[in-house]
Image (cartoon, rainbow, N blue to C red):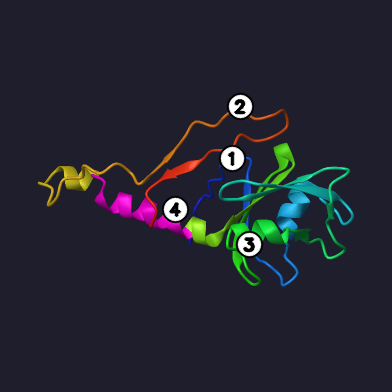
Amino acid sequence: MPTVPRTVIHVGVLIGVAAVSNSGRVRDLTLLDALGWAPGDRTTTDLRDDAILLQRHPTGPHRINSRREAFLPAGARTLLGITANSRVLLAADPAHDLLTIYPCTLVATLLTYHHQFESTAPTASRLDRPASRPNTQPPPFSATEPAAAPAGRLPVVSIQGEKP
């Protein structure tokens, strides 16, 4: 049987999913390897509207432990609704030495809106026949333009729209 060619698109960001431990730590060895983070490395934490950003910094208050787990401060976890054993999406950006943590509830909400909009958007096959209902609704989310980011930091894009 012939093999299907694999298309690899490099976007610079690697994605993983991890469970948050009772002590507020997460681990994905593939992502930590890509970032070059090792036990003893220090990290700083920055909280955004919908994510926790970890960045390696020589004087950061938290360390990657011997099990290669990154610590998420309790206050940040609480504000984002992340509890022990919650799943989170991890996005590693090696070019900026940045690990971003998103609650899976946010990811699920965005995917739900995406699929709801996709199911009502016109497609080539739908354009050939009359629509049963017009699609006059804009997508429920729109991204605002990112503000200029400080040197070495990624711009933050805010997601705005209707709440579920």
Q: Is residue 118 visible?
A: yes
Write down the residue under mark 4: 110
- Asked if labels 1 and 4 touch by Cβ distance under 8 angstroms, the answer is no
- Asked if labels 3 and 2 touch by Cβ distance under 8 angstroms, the answer is no
Give the x, y percent position of residue 164.
38, 57
Q: Earlier in the sequence, mark 4 or mark 2?
A: 4
Residue type at mark 2: give it: Ala
Write down the residue under mark 2: 148
Whether residue 99 appears in magenta in the rendering, the answer is: no
CA gap between label 4 and label 1 equals: 20 Å
Majority SS type along the magenta span = helix
- Of helix, strand and loop, which one carries label 4? helix
Select label 3 or label 1 by which is in front: 3
Write down the residue under mark 3: 78
Residue type at mark 1: give it: Val
Q: Earlier in the sequence, mark 1 or mark 2?
A: 1
Residue type at mark 4: give it: Leu
**For the magenta stretch, what is the residue range?**
108-122
